[in-house]
C-alpha cells in the first residue's frame, strides 16, 4: 500500500481557511503552544477540520478527536497515528 | 406602558445600493435595477429577471461568516452594522440584557440549505459541514447578530412572508415596552437560488418576462407578476427618551401597526383583510385617513392583488394621497420587501421627497401614483403596506419625529 | 384595567400520545417512545433513533391527508384545543382572534424529498421544477403553519409564525400572550409543530455530534441528567393552546386551566451552538419571569426542564436553576419529558408547556425516564423514572436553542389566590 504523505501545516492552514473561514499564519499554526481556540477555531470549527481531514486522508480520527486535540500539533500527531494504524 | 418607539438607524442592503445613502440615491432617482439572474443559470426556468445585490462580503463582514453563515445572514450582519453606525451606536450596550435582536425572513438560509442537501444526497451524510446545523435555519440571523454584538436581551424570529419586515419592527416595539432599551430589528433575505425559487414556479406569481423594463409593472395593465429580489434592511429602534439621551437623531416614529389575516390565500381579491390592517394601524397611531401623506404600496403586480390594493387605498384615502412603490425598480425581496419599504419611507420623511415607481404607462386606477421622477412634498406621516402569500396583511404608520 | 392571559384549551400530538389523555398516560407511566427510525432508511447515519408519531392515529377522523406531516400534527392538536376550550370563533369578533405558531424547520422534510427528485439525487445545482410537487409553494416557508391553523379556526387577527429554532414553541406562546396583554387580540390560538425526522436533519445533527448514538438500545437512548447521557434524540409532534384574556374567558364561561404568569426570551450571545457552563443568561431569564409574575424562588413547585440529554445542556440548565433559585433549586422537582417523547425542536417548547400545565392541573409531575445514575454535576431532584404526586401552584418551563435563545415561561394555578399584574 502506498504511503500517505504527511500533512503539512500549510495544508492544515488551507483547510481552516476553506472550511472554517479563518485565515491563519503557518508559523503561528505550527508553534507547539498554539491552540485552535487561539486562532479562532472553536468547537464547531474543529469538527469541520476533523471531518475534512478524515475525507482527505481516508482515515477515522475517532469520534472525540475534536475534543481530544486542542492544538494543531496534537491533531497532526493523532492523524499520523491513525494513518500508521491504517497501513 | 406608553413608550414612543423611534427609528434612529437605517441599514438597507438592496439591489440599488448598500447603506442609506446609496439606497436613497438609487431609490429616489427611480432607476430600474432589475437585470437577468446571474447567481445561477436560470436557463430552462420560467423566471430569469431579478434584483441582485452587489455584495462585497470581504468589505462588509468578517471573513468567517462567508463560510459559516448563509448569504441572508451575511446581509443581516452587514445591515445591522450599517444601521448601528447610522444610529451612532456601537455595541456592546452598557447593559447587554437591554439590547435585543428581532429578524424576519421568508426562506431562511435556503442557499446554504441547498448546498447541504447536495452534499448529503450526492456524497453521503459524513460530508455535511457542521455549520449545516445552523446556517439554513431561519433563526440564524438573529443568533449571529446577537452573538457578534453581545446582545443578550429579547430576541425573536418572525415569519409572515412579505409582511415580516413590518412585523419585526412591531415586535421590537413590544420589547421596548417591556424594558428593553435598544433593539436591532428588520429582515434579511437571499432567495435567488434554485432551492428557494423552484417551489414558487407553479404558483405563477413571479414575472416570466425576460425584459427587465417590462418584468415588474405594478398597478399597470401590463402587470405580469413580480420580480424576486434579495436584500435586507435592519433598523435601530429605541425609545425617544433614550435616543435623546444618546444624542442620536430620531429618523421616524413607529406610530401604529395593524396585522390581520385573509383567509383566502395568495392575496385576497376582496382586500378586506388589508383594509382592516390599515384601520387598525391608523387607530393605533391615533390618525385619521387624511393625515396620511404618502402610501408605500405592497405592489405585487399580480392583477387581482393590485386591483384589491388600489381599491383599499381609494376607499380609505380617496385619490388625493400620493401612492408609490419603489420596489418596482429593484424587485420584491420577500420579508425584506416590507423592511426596505420602511427604509424608503423613513428616508422619504427625512428628505421630504417621495421616491417614484420607475415606470407606469397604463395605470389600472386613477390614484395619484408617483411615477418616473421623485416628488417633493411636505411629508409628516407615511403608511407602509405589506401582504404575505399565506394571507398575512400588515400596515405600519410612521411619523416624522417633529410631527 | 390590567389584562391577564389564561389557558382555556389544550391539544397535543406526541409520540405515543395523540390527544391529552393518551399523552398524560404516557408521561405518568414514564415510558420512553424512542425507537429505531422508520420514516426513512437511516443506514449510514451516526444516530439512527427517534421518537415518531403515529400519523394514522393523529389524523383520525380528520381530512388532513393533503397537509404536510407537521401541519397534520398541528391541525389535530388545534382541533382538540378548540374543542376543549369550547371556543367557537364564528361567535367571536374574528379580527380579535389571532394565531401564533412556532416551528424550527417547517416543511423542510417535504422540501428535501422534492429536492432529491428535482436535483436528480443531488447531482445538479439547477433544479428541474417540473419534477417537483405543484403544491410546493405551500411548503416553501414556515409561515404556512400559522396560515393553515388560522384557516382551520377562522382567525383573522394577527397570524404569525415564529421560527426561533428549538425555542420556537415556547416563544410562539410568549408572543401570543404579549398580543393579548397589549390589546392586539383577545384570543390567540398558539403552539408549535415539527416533523423533523428526515435525512437532512439527522445528518446535520450528526455533523456536530449532539444526538445520541446509542443505536443498540434505543429505548434508553435519551438520558437527561444521567452520567451516561450522550445526546438528544429527535422527536416530532405538535401542541396547541387556546390563550385568552381572563375576562373574555370568564364572560363566555370557559374553564380556566392555568394563567400565563410570565415569559422572557434572551440570547446568551455566546456561541451559535455552544452553551456556557454557568447558565447565567438562562438564570437571568428565570429571574425576569419571576419578577414579572411577582413570585419568589420558593413559590416554584415544578420545573419542566429543557433537559435534552446533551453533555452541555444538562449542566448548563442545572447551574442556571441554581443561580436563579438558590437553595430552593434542590427542593423544586425538575424533570425532562424529552426522555420519553424526544426533542421535537420547534414543537418541544409547546409540548412541554402543555405537560407543565397538566402538572399544575393534575397535581402530578412527570418523571425523567432513563435516569439511572445522575451526573455528579447534576445534583437536583429530577424525579427519576417514576411520576410523583405533588401539588403544583406555579410551574416554570425552560427552553434553550441553537443561536443562543434562552426562553422561560411561568404558569400559575388559577385558584392560587394571586391577582397581581403579569406582563409576559
Image (cartoon, coloured by chain):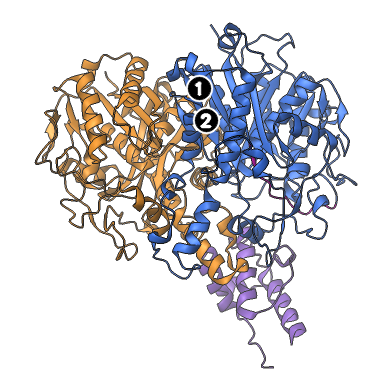
Chain colours: A purple, B orange, C blue
Say whether residue C79 is magenta.
Answer: no
Write down the region rendered in magenta. Answer: C228-238
Q: Quadrant of residue A44?
A: bottom right
Which of A59/B24 is in front? A59
x and y percentages locating residue C180 in the rendered image: 52, 19
Residues packed near mark 1 inside 10 Å, few (<14), some (14 to 19) or many (20 plus) = many
Give the chain of mark 1.
C
**Which residue is the site of mark 1?**
C179
Seen in the picture, residue A78 relative to B207 is either above or below; the reply is below
Which of B263/B154 is in front? B263
Q: Quadrant of residue B401?
A: top left
x and y percentages locating residue B376 in the rendered image: 12, 30
Query: In the picture provided, is C238 more to the left or to the right than B331?
Result: right
Identify the residue shown where x is 69% and y is 54%.
Answer: C210
Q: What element does badge 1 sit on?
A: helix
x and y percentages locating residue B297 in the rendered image: 25, 33
Q: What element does badge 2 sit on?
A: strand
Q: Residue furthest left?
A: B361
Which of the labelled discs sits on residue C100, or is there none? 2
Res B261 visible: yes
Query: In the picture provided, is B300 more to the left or to the right than B138?
Result: left
Identify the residue shown where x is 57% and y is 45%.
Answer: C69
Q: Quadrant of residue C157?
A: top left
x and y percentages locating residue A62 in the rendered image: 74, 70
Which of C213/B102 is in front? C213
Judged by its main secondary structure, the magenta piece is loop
Query: In the picture provided, is B104 more to the left or to the right than B137?
Result: left
Say whether residue C236 is magenta.
Answer: yes
What is the CA distance from the residue labelled 2 to the residue labelled 1? 9 Å
Tell me whether circle 2 and circle 1 mark residues in contact (CB < 8 Å). Answer: yes
- The tag earlier along the polypeptide, 2 or 1, is 2
The nearer-to-camera label among 2 and 1 is 2
Amino acid at each position: 500500500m502506498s504511503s500517505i504523505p504527511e500533512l503539512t501545516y500549510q495544508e492544515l492552514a488551507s483547510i481552516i481557511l476553506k472550511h472554517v473561514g479563518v485565515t491563519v499564519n503557518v508559523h503561528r499554526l505550527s508553534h507547539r503552544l498554539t491552540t485552535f481556540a487561539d486562532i479562532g477555531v472553536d468547537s464547531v470549527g474543529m469538527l469541520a477540520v476533523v471531518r475534512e481531514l478524515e475525507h482527505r486522508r481516508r482515515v477515522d480520527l475517532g469520534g472525540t478527536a475534536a475534543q481530544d486535540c486542542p492544538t494543531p500539533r496534537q491533531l497532526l500527531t493523532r492523524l499520523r497515528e491513525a494513518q500508521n494504524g491504517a497501513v | 406602558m406608553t413608550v414612543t418607539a423611534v427609528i434612529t438607524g437605517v441599514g438597507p442592503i438592496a439591489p440599488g445600493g448598500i447603506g442609506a445613502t446609496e439606497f436613497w440615491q438609487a431609490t429616489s432617482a427611480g432607476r430600474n435595477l432589475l437585470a437577468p439572474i446571474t447567481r445561477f443559470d436560470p436557463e430552462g426556468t420560467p423566471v430569469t429577471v431579478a434584483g441582485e445585490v452587489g455584495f462585497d462580503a470581504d468589505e462588509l463582514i468578517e471573513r468567517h461568516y462567508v463560510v459559516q453563515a448563509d448569504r441572508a445572514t451575511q446581509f443581516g450582519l452587514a445591515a445591522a452594522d450599517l444601521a448601528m453606525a447610522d444610529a451612532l451606536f456601537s455595541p456592546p450596550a452598557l447593559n447587554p440584557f437591554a439590547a435585543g435582536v428581532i429578524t424576519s425572513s421568508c426562506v431562511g438560509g435556503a442557499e446554504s440549505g441547498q448546498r447541504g442537501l447536495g452534499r448529503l444526497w450526492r456524497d453521503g451524510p459524513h460530508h455535511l459541514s457542521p455549520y449545516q446545523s445552523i446556517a439554513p435555519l431561519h433563526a440564524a440571523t438573529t443568533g449571529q447578530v446577537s452573538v457578534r454584538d453581545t446582545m443578550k436581551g429579547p430576541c425573536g424570529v418572525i415569519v409572515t412572508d412579505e409582511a415580516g419586515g413590518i412585523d419585526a419592527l412591531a415586535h421590537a416595539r413590544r420589547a421596548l415596552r417591556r424594558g428593553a432599551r435598544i433593539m436591532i430589528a428588520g429582515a434579511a433575505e437571499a432567495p435567488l437560488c434554485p432551492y428557494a425559487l423552484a417551489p414558487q414556479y407553479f404558483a405563477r406569481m413571479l414575472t416570466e418576462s425576460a425584459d427587465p423594463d417590462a418584468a415588474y409593472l405594478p398597478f399597470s395593465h401590463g402587470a405580469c407578476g413580480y420580480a424576486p429580489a434579495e436584500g435586507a434592511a435592519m433598523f435601530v429602534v429605541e425609545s425617544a427618551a433614550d435616543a435623546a439621551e444618546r444624542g442620536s437623531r430620531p429618523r421616524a416614529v413607529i406610530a401604529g401597526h395593524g396585522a390581520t389575516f385573509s383567509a383566502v390565500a395568495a392575496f385576497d381579491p376582496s382586500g378586506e383583510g388589508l383594509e382592516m390592517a390599515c384601520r387598525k394601524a391608523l387607530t393605533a397611531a391615533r390618525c385619521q385617513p387624511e393625515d396620511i401623506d404618502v402610501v408605500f404600496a405592497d405592489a405585487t403586480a399580480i392583477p387581482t392583488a393590485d386591483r384589491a390594493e388600489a381599491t383599499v387605498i381609494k376607499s380609505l384615502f380617496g385619490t388625493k394621497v400620493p401612492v408609490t412603490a419603489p420596489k418596482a425598480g429593484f424587485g420584491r425581496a420577500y420579508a425584506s420587501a416590507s423592511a426596505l419599504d420602511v427604509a424608503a419611507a423613513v428616508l422619504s420623511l427625512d428628505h421630504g421627497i417621495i421616491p417614484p415607481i420607475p415606470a407606469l404607462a397604463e395605470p389600472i386606477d386613477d390614484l395619484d401614483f408617483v411615477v418616473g421622477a421623485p416628488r417633493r412634498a411636505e411629508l409628516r406621516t407615511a403608511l407602509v403596506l405589506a401582504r404575505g402569500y399565506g394571507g398575512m396583511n400588515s400596515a405600519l404608520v410612521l411619523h416624522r419625529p417633529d410631527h | 384595567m390590567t389584562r391577564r392571559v389564561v389557558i382555556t384549551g389544550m391539544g397535543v400530538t406526541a409520540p405515543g400520545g395523540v390527544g391529552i389523555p393518551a399523552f398524560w398516560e404516557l408521561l405518568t407511566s414514564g415510558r420512553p417512545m424512542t425507537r429505531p427510525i422508520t420514516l426513512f432508511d437511516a443506514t449510514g447515519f451516526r444516530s439512527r433513533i427517534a421518537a415518531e408519531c403515529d400519523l394514522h392515529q393523529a389524523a383520525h377522523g380528520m381530512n388532513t391527508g393533503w397537509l404536510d406531516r407537521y401541519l397534520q400534527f398541528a391541525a389535530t392538536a388545534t382541533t382538540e384545543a378548540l374543542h376543549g376550550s369550547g371556543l367557537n370563533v364564528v361567535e367571536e369578533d374574528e379580527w380579535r382572534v389571532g394565531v401564533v405558531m412556532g416551528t424550527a424547520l417547517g416543511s423542510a422534510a417535504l422540501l428535501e424529498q422534492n429536492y432529491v427528485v428535482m436535483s436528480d439525487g443531488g447531482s445538479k445545482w439547477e433544479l428541474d421544477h417540473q419534477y417537483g410537487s405543484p403544491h410546493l409553494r405551500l411548503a416553501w416557508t414556515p409561515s404556512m403553519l400559522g396560515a393553515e391553523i388560522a384557516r382551520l379556526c377562522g382567525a383573522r387577527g394577527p397570524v404569525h409564525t415564529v421560527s426561533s429554532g428549538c425555542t420556537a414553541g415556547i416563544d410562539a406562546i410568549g408572543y401570543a400572550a404579549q398580543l393579548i396583554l397589549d390589546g392586539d387580540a383577545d384570543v390567540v390560538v398558539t403552539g408549535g409543530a415539527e416533523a423533523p425526522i428526515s435525512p437532512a436533519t439527522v445528518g446535520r445533527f450528526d455533523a456536530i455530534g449532539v444526538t445520541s448514538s446509542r443505536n443498540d438500545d434505543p429505548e434508553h437512548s435519551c438520558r437527561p441528567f444521567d452520567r451516561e447521557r450522550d445526546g438528544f434524540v429527535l422527536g416530532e409532534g405538535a401542541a396547541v393552546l387556546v390563550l385568552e384574556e381572563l375576562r373574555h374567558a370568564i364572560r363566555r364561561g370557559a374553564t380556566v386551566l392555568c394563567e400565563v404568569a410570565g415569559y422572557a426570551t434572551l440570547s446568551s450571545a455566546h456561541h451559535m451552538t455552544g452553551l456556557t457552563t454557568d447558565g447565567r443568561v438562562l438564570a437571568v431569564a428565570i429571574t425576569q419571569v419571576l419578577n414579572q409574575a411577582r413570585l419568589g424562588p420558593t413559590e416554584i413547585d415544578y420545573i419542566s426542564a429543557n433537559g435534552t440529554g446533551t453533555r452541555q445542556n444538562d449542566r448548563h440548565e442545572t447551574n442556571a436553576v441554581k443561580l436563579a433559585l438558590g437553595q430552593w433549586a434542590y427542593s423544586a422537582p425538575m424533570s425532562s419529558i424529552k426522555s420519553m417523547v424526544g426533542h421535537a425542536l420547534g414543537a418541544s417548547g409547546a409540548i412541554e408547556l402543555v405537560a407543565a400545565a397538566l402538572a399544575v392541573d393534575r397535581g402530578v409531575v412527570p418523571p425523567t425516564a432513563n435516569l439511572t445514575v445522575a451526573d455528579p454535576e447534576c445534583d437536583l431532584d429530577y424525579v427519576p423514572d417514576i411520576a410523583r404526586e405533588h401539588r403544583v401552584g406555579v410551574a416554570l418551563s425552560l427552553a434553550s436553542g441553537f443561536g443562543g435563545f434562552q426562553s422561560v415561561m411561568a404558569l400559575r394555578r388559577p385558584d392560587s389566590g394571586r391577582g397581581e399584574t403579569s406582563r409576559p
